[in-house]
Amino acid sequence: MSQAKLSIRDVRVRRRGVDILHVPHLDVLPGEVLAVIGPNGAGKTTLLMVLALLERPSQGQVLFEGQSVEGQELPLRRRMAVVLQEVLLLRRSVVDNVAMGLALRGVPSRERQKRALHWMERFGIAHLAHRGTRNLSGGEAQRASLARAFALEPEVLLLDEPFNGLDQPTREGLLEELAGVLAETGVTTVFVTHDRDEAARLAHRVAVLLGGRLRQVGPVAEVFAAPVDEEVAAFVGVETMVPARVVGDAGGLARLEVAGHAIEAVSRGPLAADVLVCLRPEDVVLALPDGLSTSSARNRLPGVVTRVVPAGVQVRVTVDCGFPLLAAITRQSLEELGLGVGVRVVASFKATAIHLIPRSGGH
Amino acid sequence: MDLIWDGIREALRILGTGDYSLWEITLRSLFISGSAVAISLLIGTALGSVLAFNEFPGRNLAFAVVNTGMGLPPVVVGLLVAIMLWRSGPLGQLNLIYTPLAMIAAQTIIAAPIVTGFTAAALRSLSPRLRSQLYALGASRLQMLWLILWEAKLPLLAAVMAGFGAAVSEIGASIMVGGNLAGETRVLTTAVVLEVSRGEFAPAIALSIVLLALIFAVNLILTTVQQQEQRS
């Protein structure tokens, strides 16, 4: 594995004698998009500020390419870019704001104007270049903030809830553009959000932060499908999430390839080549391979039961179909089918039960 | 009524001719108060930044001290500076008493707390996250301070106005540490007092008109700049 771009070792941030953040270990890998998700007050912003070298932890170390950042904060900050939750622009023209980081790095005026305008164009705000910043809409300000970060062509990009407070259509549009730019630049990114869907859409890996502690770090599909414990499950909402390739899309029915299996899903509108297949456990029916199936579902995948977890009146069964597939069945069915770890089953679900999330770039 | 009308008529004549060293006194007032405000701006922005940005024990006390300083009676400041600079005082060997430098020192003590208070208030009104944002953009500490002060330049202009107004119109300290020596330490305010005590109302009115015009001009310039800034 390549060396981590940015790492945290045994970091604690203490306020008034209380540890509000304790992260023993976290690596941000080169070129990856890592989403840090958690509810409000979980310490996500604090973690981001520590990574951005804007907050010195009470204890522990931050490493940049394996080297301690101690004493190197300013030069290292100049290799990173941060988009804070609150968009703060100075009383200057928009283009001067976008070029500000470059000016602070001593980039000559002509060059920084050129780069600023390029990124403003990329985010669709070039026409605002010579306006003041006070009458910008929330979406325009956020685009300026993103352009300001990308204009630095950073090695590491840190984003703190960049879509907070935007209305739904604006958020959708910007999410789309950001996904495109991230895939195109391949910049190492840490992205803080409380929104599961944003994480699923943008990130390669997810880190779940609850009460100042990292509870689970792993690929998006894995974390959403197999939360390590109840609290993580309660936050991420348990369901199957697995990357798939679209191999055909006709008449509203998409043919997808998932871990070597062909499945069909109802599609709404045109699809990207890469998608995330989401499936709620309640929509999955389990049967024995030799049993008579009463299900009319289009999708039937063979697999082996790897985990059985009672949850109230239901039982959550994880089936390995080449990817972990979650099914929720009644205790009665469990007993009738004689399910247990190691038993071969066929999992089936309807094409309408699948929710597709577009994923830009080859994840 | 004749006293008033004759006074004003004679004052206008003096304004035209510049008798009674009118313009020399005006220039000295501008130089002394301008210097005091310039020094206050350096001290005030530095102290104001420290107060606004740093959490330290006794910060509230420091704010109370600055706020008290904003209303310091000039007479008390004059007394303090006079004692310090008196021939037998702690700084007596500097021979500064009854010199323009002594007046600049006294007016700085009067204007500096005003600039400090205005600066601290101006910086505290900016988002506390702005500093983080500027550091995040790669600013050094000095670059951050410069950008923040530039961002707060309108309130800082107000600080300059208030500081200059207080310095140029104070009299107690100027008389005590300057001595109102003709051709050396006589400024607009001290000259007015002298002329009135002699019963010479016309030159006193002329000097007062100049003093008012001066304060008005400075405020007009600064207000115009502010308005233009706000419009852009």
Image (cartoon, grey):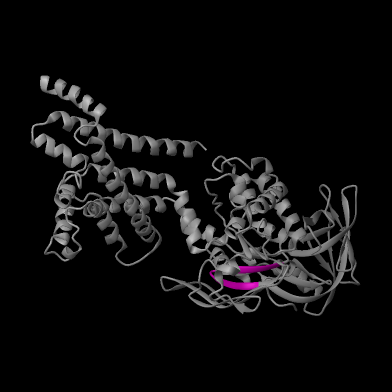
Residue A52 at x, y percent in the picture: 58, 66
Q: Please name the residue shown 60% across and 72% down the image.
A: A214
Between residues A292 and A282, which one lies in front from this camera angle?
A: A282
**Does B163 appear above or below B134?**
above
Tell me if I can see residue B7 in this picture.
Answer: yes
Between residues A37 and A302, which one lies in front from this camera angle?
A: A37
Tell me if I can see residue A163 in this picture.
Answer: no
Q: Please name the residue shown 50% across and 55% down the image.
A: B130
Q: Quadrant of residue A254?
A: bottom right
Examine the residues drawn in magenta and state their main secondary structure: strand
Between residues B1 and A35, which one lies in front from this camera angle?
A: B1
The answer to whether residue A221 is left or right of residue B88 is: right
Residue B124 at x, y percent in the picture: 40, 53
Residue A206 colored in magenta in the image: yes
**Does B19 appear above or below A230?**
above
The answer to whether residue B44 is left or right of residue B77 is: right
**Does B210 appear above or below A293?**
above
Residue range in magenta is: A205-216
Q: Please name the residue shown 30% across and 46% down the image.
A: B31
Q: Quadrant of residue A23?
A: bottom right
Q: How many marks?
A: 0
Q: Please name the residue shown 71% across and 50% down the image.
A: A118
